[in-house]
Image (spheres, helix red, strand yellow):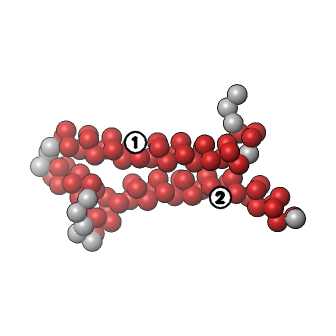
């Protein structure tokens, strides 16, 4: 019985940290793709920087930014479902 109350209270900060870490992992894919020579958006962006193809750099940056914003939005919506005190009025 006590575990249910403790878990619900402790789940909100854990969920927030999970969202922040997922956003961090999305940003670090650029380095991972370069180190392990994988094809993806990070490698595309670094190659575009090398040849000064700025529209591609801007496009990939926008894709990464949208992904981070969507993850933060989903994290906030999930926190609002877990605790009604953090919902907007």
At numbered mark 1, what does the secondary structure look like: helix, strand or loop?
A: helix
Image quadrant in which you'd find residue 27: bottom left
Image quadrant in which you'd find residue 88: top right
Query: In what quadrant of the picture does the C terminus appear?
Result: top right
CA–CA distance in space, label 2 to label 1: 23 Å
Mark 2 or mark 1: which comes first in sequence? 2
Question: Measured from the top left, where is residue 33 in percent x and y?
Answer: 28, 64
Count up the numbered dots. 2
The 10 Å Cα crowd at callout 2, few under 14, some 14 to 19, many 20 or more, is: few
Question: Measured from the top left, where is residue 60 in percent x and y?
Answer: 28, 46
**Left or right of 53 on screen, residue 38:** right
**Left or right of 28 on screen, residue 11:** right
Task: Look at 83% across and 58% down and name the residue there.
Answer: 5
Q: Residue furthest right?
A: 1
The 10 Å Cα crowd at callout 1, few under 14, some 14 to 19, many 20 or more, is: few
Is residue 4 depicted above or below 67 in this figure?
below
- Residue at label 2? 14
**Left or right of 81 on screen, residue 64:** left
- Residue at label 1? 66
Task: Look at 46% across and 42% down and name the residue there.
Answer: 69
Question: Measured from the top left, where is residue 87 in percent x and y?
Answer: 69, 36
């Amino acid at each position: 019985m006590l575990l249910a109350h403790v878990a619900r209270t402790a789940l909100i900060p854990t969920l927030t940290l999970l969202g922040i870490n997922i956003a961090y992992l999305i940003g670090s894919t650029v380095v991972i793709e370069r180190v392990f020579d994988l094809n993806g958006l990070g490698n595309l962006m670094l190659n575009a920087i090398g040849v000064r193809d700025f529209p591609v750099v801007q496009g990939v940056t926008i894709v990464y930014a949208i992904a981070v914003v969507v993850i933060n939005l989903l994290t906030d919506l999930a926190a609002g479902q877990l605790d009604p005190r953090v919902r907007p009025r």
